[in-house]
Image: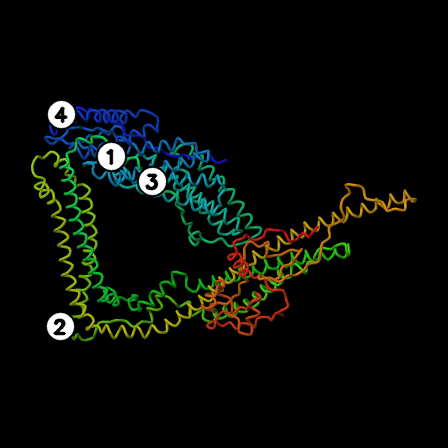
Amino acid sequence: MAPANMLLAVHCKKGDHLDLKDPIWSYICLTYSDQQAHDAADDLATVQQLRNDVVGLTGSLPDLRETLARYYKALTVMETRFPISKDKGHVVLSFTWYDAFRASKRAEQYSIHFEKAAVMFNLAAVLTQQALACDRTQDQGMKDAAKKFQEAAGAFAHLRDVASLRVEQPRPVDISPECASMLERLCLAQAQECIFEKARADKKSSAILARLTKQVSAFYDDVLRLLSGAPLSQHFDKSWTSHVQVKTTLYDVESQLQQAAQLHKDDDIAPEISRLKEAHKSLILVKAQSKQCGKELIDNVKHSEEILSTALVKAERENATVYLQRIPNFADLPPIQPYILVKSLSLPDIDAAGETLFQTVIPDNSAKALSKYTEMVDNLIRQQKDKLEAASDEARLRLREWDMPEALQALDAGSAAALPDGLRAELEQLEDHGGVRHLHDLAAQIKDLRRVAMEELKKVESALDKESVDDAELRDKYGSRWNRPASAALNSSMREKVAGYQANLTAAGDSDARLEQRLMQNNAAFSALSIDAAVAHMPRLQAPMVSVGDEEPAMVVTNLRKALAEIDELSAERASIEEALKEERNRDNILPKLMASSGRSDNIFAEEIKKYDELKGNVDANVARQNELLAVINKNTAAYRQAFGFREWRQACEGAASGMKSKVALFSEVRENFSEGLRFYMSLQEAISHLAQQVGDYSLTRQIQRDDMIEDLTRGSSQAAQQMQQMSLNPGSGAPQQPPSGAPPPPHSYPPPAYQGGAQGSQVQGGYNPQAHSSHHYPPPTPQYYHQQPQAQQQLGQPPSNPYMQQPQPQQQQQAQYGAYSQPNYGQQSPYQPPQPPQQPQQQQAYYNPYAQQQSHANSSAPPTQSNPLWGNK
């Protein structure tokens, strides 16, 4: 049994008690009226009690969470009503809190934003403590713990994005954006751990567990990165770093273990050993560091090491005695894709929109003035962002029009700028998919699918043969008493399917061979399809021997490079300006000034809006400088094209690229042929699987019928023997003896099969009907790669065409109606020449047509009959 998994909870910040009631009461009396102060008395008492409970950390964890959320909403309401600072005429309140990770560090600020940040931190900390208190040995406990950690992550995200940004500098480290980000990722990592624990308890597949643990490791790696940077690296104890480092490695090892277990199930022994060895290396490196962690984590490391060692020894022994495979390098193995199932959840109980505290205190003119100023700021920022976006669009369009900087890059040796855009994009896509190796992989996949299809089809045929032989032997044994329908009358449609699939496989094999031959013939040409090889065949853009313009070519190139580099700098500067506008907007809070001032609010607006003048100047300077640079680039681009003969060089590149384009087109054609073949074999394999299910149901039902008949026949023979014995004991009785009451009836009479025509084809009465037992209907796929079903046929209500289905010729349409299988034809562009489809006599029973059944069921409101046609009428 795996040892208990160790998770972390965050301690709450501690604070000093403070009298809120009297200072705010005095402010209301002086600023508004005694009556408004009297009306707010109950609200002030409520807020004072809430803060006392928050600072005292009283009550159970659920009660403390509710108290923190209520107090945070109360602070949000107070923020818009009472200016709290050391300024004259404001409410003077000194909030004191201690660092959650270094209790000796004390911070004091005259700001309600500092108080809100501390309360939000404690709310998130209480959520982590609630998560840790859940019973994770139970299914519901694991769900609850995962949800609480995600809510804690949402609280820390709110602290980072909202509350922390308004805290005055110097900002305490524990409520800084960096610390909030680290704690958010820690909570997400622990929530993902809980999801993994539940998935493991639910016996999920090793592949899923590998992806889940990979994401846990990724989250802990983010935490480790943030802990190692400023300002957290000097603030947190080293045990935090050790714990996170061990967790990162431990879950990465667990991910490799789970992936190795999946490979072991798939008999893929070589990659399994490679992953186990890599996991063992990682575990050895972190084992020493785990000594600085808790006992639970040390036990987890030891447990993982034991499992890893056992699995590695077993895998190496099996490979040495059975598989004898070469062990690949770990770097060559495909990476495990992480699977994230958690996110930061927002807290709906901190929204103060419906809060009723201090409703009678705020004057209406202050609220309207604040709304007006906010609208002014929003319009200003929107105008500046529009200017910056327009400048970016202008630069992008103009540079694209001048073919810059690609035209300038063509001077560099080995530059891909010489390639036409279409060819370069095709070559990049080709290289991303693996080039010619991808074609060989497709060919190998087709071979594997073909082998599996042939093996499965052989099993189906063997099952039918076994059932037929068994029926024939029993028919010879019992003679006329064996009156159930013969196997040949029942399984003919299934045998026709087997024969059709075998014919498809035979024809498809010939097509596969021709396609592989085509690949081998062009293998060398396909291997040379790369950007580097294409660039090597392109003509080189070079400086002219004699200058024909007013400026030297070298100077033109220098001017262009300098201007383009400065354009890039201006683009980066625009991003920083937008971020500065956003930060200034978040810090801009003039409500205290509005509420403390008795003058006109317009004067305050005019003074406060000036803080954006510097940023507006930066925007105008950025746009003006870009316009100057674009003018320089335009002038030098014309000189560059003339001096270097750019147009003639581009035409030469187009001509040189024609040969490479034809090879790429041929490559795409072969790849498409392989892809079509792959889809054909997958469709055929699915159809064979359903046929195997149908044959299995048929064989099982026939076996049950056989056993019942044998039992009836045996019982009938025994009764006849008893009657003969009684007659011999009473020779004087001339009348025939009546069977005693309660004697068993004679054996069932199984009539021979009768055929009735119908809209859905022939149906065997009193025998097995494969169509009645098939819950999934699939047409027999045929490997035709290019022909598509005519549009007119689809409009007549026919089922969607199979892309591999060869369209019947006029003289073959009647045959196709009865489900005859068409032969493979991979298209006119491929090297395949399909054989003619086999002719079927019209009197033969029709092939199983799943589309006919589906149409019939779709047009009928009554459900299909679920009777068992194997049993005869008794």
| Label 4 residue SS | helix
Residue 629 position (above or below residue 870): below
Give 617 or 851, whichever is nearer the viewer. Answer: 851
Name the residue that disc number 3 marks. Answer: 345
Give 68 or 640, whichever is nearer the viewer. Answer: 68
Asked whether residue 150 appears in the rendered view, the answer is yes
Residue 574 position (above or below residue 347): below
Give 368 or 23, whichever is nearer the viewer. Answer: 368
Name the residue that disc number 4 marks. Answer: 34
Crowd around label 3: few <14 · some 14–19 · many ≥20 (10 Å): some
Crowd around label 4: few <14 · some 14–19 · many ≥20 (10 Å): some
Expressed as whole percent of the image width and height from the top left, the position of residue 165 reads 22, 39
In the rendered structure, which amino acid carries the disc numbered 3?
A: Leu
Q: Earlier in the sequence, mark 3 or mark 1?
A: 1
The nearer-to-camera label among 3 and 2 is 3
Give the colour scheme shown: rainbow
Marks 1 and 4, Cα distance to the nearest angstrom?
A: 32 Å
Name the residue that disc number 1 marks. Answer: 117
Q: Earlier in the sequence, mark 1 or mark 4?
A: 4
Q: Earlier in the sequence, mark 1 or mark 2?
A: 1
Q: Earlier in the sequence, mark 3 or mark 2?
A: 3
In the rendered structure, which amino acid carries the disc numbered 2?
A: Asp
Name the residue that disc number 2 marks. Answer: 550
Crowd around label 2: few <14 · some 14–19 · many ≥20 (10 Å): few
In the rendered structure, the answer to whether residue 368 lies left or right of residue 496 reads left
